[in-house]
C-alpha cells in the first residue's frame, strides 16, 4: 500500500476578518492608553475657599440664623420637637463640616465620637433620643440655645 502525502495550500483567510481583527486591536490599545492616562492624571484641585476670620464669622452667623428659623417654626407649631431636634442635628453637622472639612454630616454617632470634637459629640448624642424615640422629655428650646452657643463660640 502506497501512501502519499500531498501538501495542501495554506488556509486562505478572508480579508474582512483580518481588517476586523486589526480594528479591534487598535481600539483595545486606545482604550488601555486612555485608561492608563486617566489613572495617572492628577485630580483637578478644587478651588480653595479662604477660611479667614471674616469667612468663619459669616458661617457662624449663617448657621445661627438657621437655628433661629428652626426656633420660629417650633414656636409657631410648624414643626414638632422631634423635627426640631432632627433639623438641629443637620444644621450642626453641616456647620462642623463647613468649618473643619470633616464629613460629620454623613457620620453615625459612633463615628462622630471617634472624631474627637467634644462639643459636637455631646450635642449630637443629646439629640439622639429626641430624634429617634417615640416620646422624649428633652427640651428643644434649651437644645437650640446650647447649639447656637456652640456655633457662635466656634473658633
Image (spheres, helix red, strand yellow):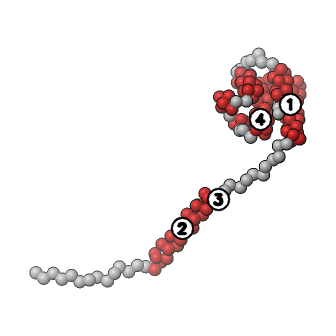
Dot in front, 3 or 2: 3
Where does residue 74 sit, x and y in percent of width and height?
85, 25
Which residue is painted at 48% across and 72% down in the image?
A: 21
The mark closer to the camera, 4 or 2, is 4
Residue under pointer 2: 29
Going from N to C along the chain, the mark reached first, 4 or 2, is: 2
In the displayed structure image, the side of residue 37 where residue 136 appears, left or right: right
Q: Residue at x 50, y 74 (%)?
A: 22
**Which residue of the protein is positioned furthest toward the top in this rendering?**
137
Alpha-carbon distance for marks 4 and 3? 31 Å
Give me the disc on residue 96. 4
C-alpha gap between disc 4 and disc 2: 47 Å
Q: Is residue 46 visible?
A: yes
For label 1, the SS is helix
The answer to whether marks 2 and 1 mark residues whose Cβ atoms lie closer than 8 Å is no
Indicate the secondary structure of the residue bearing disc 4: helix
- Which residue appears at 21% of the width and 81% of the height? 5
* Residue in the foreground of this view, choosing between 100 and 131: 100
- Where is 20 relative to 109, above or below? below
Residue 133 falls left or right of residue 149 = left
Mark toward the start of the polypeptide (3 vs 2): 2
Q: Residue furthest left?
A: 1
Q: Mark 4 or 3 closer to N-term?
A: 3
Q: Which residue is mark 3?
A: 41
Return the mark for residue 152.
1
Secondary element at image label 3: loop
Q: CA distance from mark 4 to mark 1?
A: 12 Å
Compared with 21, 9 (above or below) is below
Between discs 3 and 1, the one toward the N terminus:
3
Amino acid at each position: 500500500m502506497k501512501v502519499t502525502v500531498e501538501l495542501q495550500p495554506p488556509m486562505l483567510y478572508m480579508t474582512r476578518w483580518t481588517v476586523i481583527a486589526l480594528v479591534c486591536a487598535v481600539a483595545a490599545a486606545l482604550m488601555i492608553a486612555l485608561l492608563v492616562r486617566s489613572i495617572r492624571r492628577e485630580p483637578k484641585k478644587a478651588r480653595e475657599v479662604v477660611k479667614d476670620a471674616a469667612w468663619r464669622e459669616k458661617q457662624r452667623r449663617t448657621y445661627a440664623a438657621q437655628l433661629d428659623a428652626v426656633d420660629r417654626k417650633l414656636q409657631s407649631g410648624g414643626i414638632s420637637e422631634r423635627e426640631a431636634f432632627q433639623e438641629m442635628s443637620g444644621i450642626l453637622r453641616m456647620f462642623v463640616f463647613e468649618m473643619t472639612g470633616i464629613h460629620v454630616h454623613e457620620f453615625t454617632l459612633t463615628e462622630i465620637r471617634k472624631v474627637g470634637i467634644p462639643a459636637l459629640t455631646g450635642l449630637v448624642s443629646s439629640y439622639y433620643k429626641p430624634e429617634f424615640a417615640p416620646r422624649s422629655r428633652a427640651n428643644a428650646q434649651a437644645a437650640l440655645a446650647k447649639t447656637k452657643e456652640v456655633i457662635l463660640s466656634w473658633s
